[in-house]
């Protein structure tokens, strides 16, 4: 479906007015295809890369359904993503009286209980914290009429499958609810999830699996581990805009952020060892320019929805080749251009080939430039930490299934909320 605006998709006039006032003028391809199906109550399985506007693709149908008394549940893999989805719901549904509850780890439990007591129309949360509320009987999901699983591949990759199954057993059966599932990739376990918990879903595919925004240019350097800091210094000197740097481990993120500060750049780090407030401050500081460089791990990557990122640097190659797609998708958003640079060690040629197979392209290899001399302060930085683990799923932040982020407080009261 080709459309130049949101009119003609079946959206209620009041929502159209809000979209217009908030600057949403032209639907993205996933929005143009998913919104009409969602408004008709169909189950939808949306396959689209990050940064394509999936939040409105499911948010508009959910808000419109809630205006008729339905209750909605949105499940996401990370706190940052949940926060940003809530922001969109507040922007679009708030003026129409749609209340939300945000259930994420690291946030005060008292505030969440208060939100639940008010009977929210939409609950937005991460699997671990939703399970916490189910176990404490502070929430019931028996009245959910529209369920959204966003970044489903990431949730399974982070080990949330048992939690998702538990939650899906608490909502009404598939024929009594509408389900919308969105994923950047469609591995067999996602297809199995859809087969088990959805009813004849309409598959909407915006880009083939493994493809990235065509406006992202890519570059690869083969380099030794010890030369990575100096190549990063060279790269940060050549590019003037916002730079997002990915490392494989939390320790690596801390070390690279420290390096960036040593060479004169404002930098923050984003990973699971940071508190919720620290992560929010880092992301907001990156968004408003207080930090020029943000160093992140993959577990935090999908929560980074920031326009205007000029460059993505893969300081470490990802443990999973599919994560490369999500990483470089952080740049070239909303129609802008962007660039991605990857540092690969000579022993990682197989990892590069795996990425190229997923991407269906050959990564352009560049010759190493003249590197700056070793800085004295580099010798005082923390050591590099443990060596790279064997190939396969990353272990640094995903071990233990991702269950139960740090609690923000105890359970002091019970809620009889219908959500």
Image (cartoon, rainbow, N blue to C red):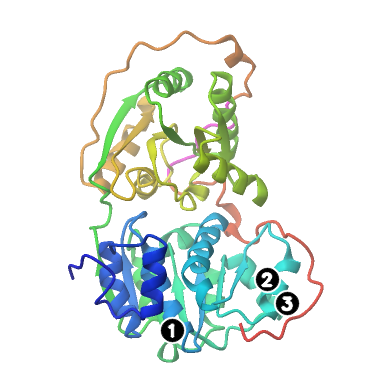
Asked whether, in this view, residue 132 is left or right of residue 308, the answer is right
Q: Which mark is residue 22?
A: none
Q: Closer to us: mark 1 or mark 3?
A: 1
Which residue shows up at 58% across the image and 24% down it?
261
Which residue shows up at 46% across the image and 69% down it?
92
Would you name the residue on which mark 3 appears? Answer: 136
The dominant secondary structure in magenta is loop
- Vertical placement of 44 versus 373: above or below? below
- Vertical placement of 332 versus 132: above or below? above
| Badge 3: residue crowd in 10 Å (few <14, some 14–19, many ≥20) | few
Secondary structure at numbered mark 3 = loop
Secondary structure at numbered mark 1 = helix
**Extreme residue toward the right, this view:** 412
Q: Is residue 159 visible?
A: no
Would you name the residue on which mark 2 appears? Answer: 132
Asked whether, in this view, residue 413 is left or right of residue 71, the answer is right
């Amino acid at each position: 479906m080709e459309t130049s605006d949101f009119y003609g998709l079946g959206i209620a006039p009041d929502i159209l007015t809000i979209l217009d006032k908030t600057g949403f003028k032209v639907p993205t391809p996933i929005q143009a295809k998913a919104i009409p199906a969602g408004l008709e109550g169909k189950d939808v399985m949306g396959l689209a890369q990050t940064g394509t506007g999936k939040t409105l693709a499911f948010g508009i149908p959910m808000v419109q359904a809630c205006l008729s008394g339905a209750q909605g549940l949105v499940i996401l893999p990370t706190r940052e993503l949940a926060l940003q989805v809530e922001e969109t719901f507040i922007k679009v549904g708030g003026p129409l009286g749609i209340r939300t509850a945000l259930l994420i780890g690291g946030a005060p439990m008292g505030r969440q209980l208060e939100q639940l007591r008010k009977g929210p129309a939409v609950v937005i949360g991460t699997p671990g914290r939703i399970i916490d509320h189910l176990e404490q009987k502070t929430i019931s999901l028996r009245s959910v009429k529209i369920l959204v699983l966003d970044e489903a591949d990431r949730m399974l990759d982070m080990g949330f499958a048992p939690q998702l199954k538990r939650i899906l057993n608490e909502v009404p059966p598939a024929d009594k609810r509408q389900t919308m599932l969105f994923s950047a990739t469609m591995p067999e376990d996602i297809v199995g999830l859809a087969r088990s918990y959805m009813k004849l879903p309409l598959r909407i595919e915006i880009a083939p699996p493994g493809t990235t925004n065509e406006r992202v240019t890519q570059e690869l350097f083969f380099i030794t581990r010890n030369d990575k800091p100096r190549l990063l210094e060279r790269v940060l000197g050549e590019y003037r805009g916002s730079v997002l740097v990915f490392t494989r481990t939390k320790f690596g993120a801390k070390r690279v952020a420290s390096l960036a500060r040593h060479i004169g750049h404002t930098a923050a780090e984003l990973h699971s060892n940071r508190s919720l407030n620290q992560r929010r401050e880092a992301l907001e500081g990156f968004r408003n320019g207080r930090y020029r460089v943000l160093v992140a791990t993959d577990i935090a990557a999908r929560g980074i929805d920031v326009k205007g990122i000029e460059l993505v640097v893969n300081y470490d190659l990802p443990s999973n080749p599919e994560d490369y797609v999500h990483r470089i998708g952080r740049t070239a958003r909303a129609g802008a251009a962007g660039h991605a640079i990857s540092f690969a060690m000579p022993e990682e040629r197989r990892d590069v080939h795996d990425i190229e197979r997923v991407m269906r392209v050959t990564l352009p290899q560049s010759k190493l430039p003249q590197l700056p001399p070793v800085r004295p302060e580099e010798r005082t930085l923390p050591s590099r930490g443990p060596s790279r683990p064997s190939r396969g799923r990353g272990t640094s932040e995903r071990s233990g299934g991702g269950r139960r982020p740090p609690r923000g407080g105890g359970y002091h009261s019970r809620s009889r909320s219908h959500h």
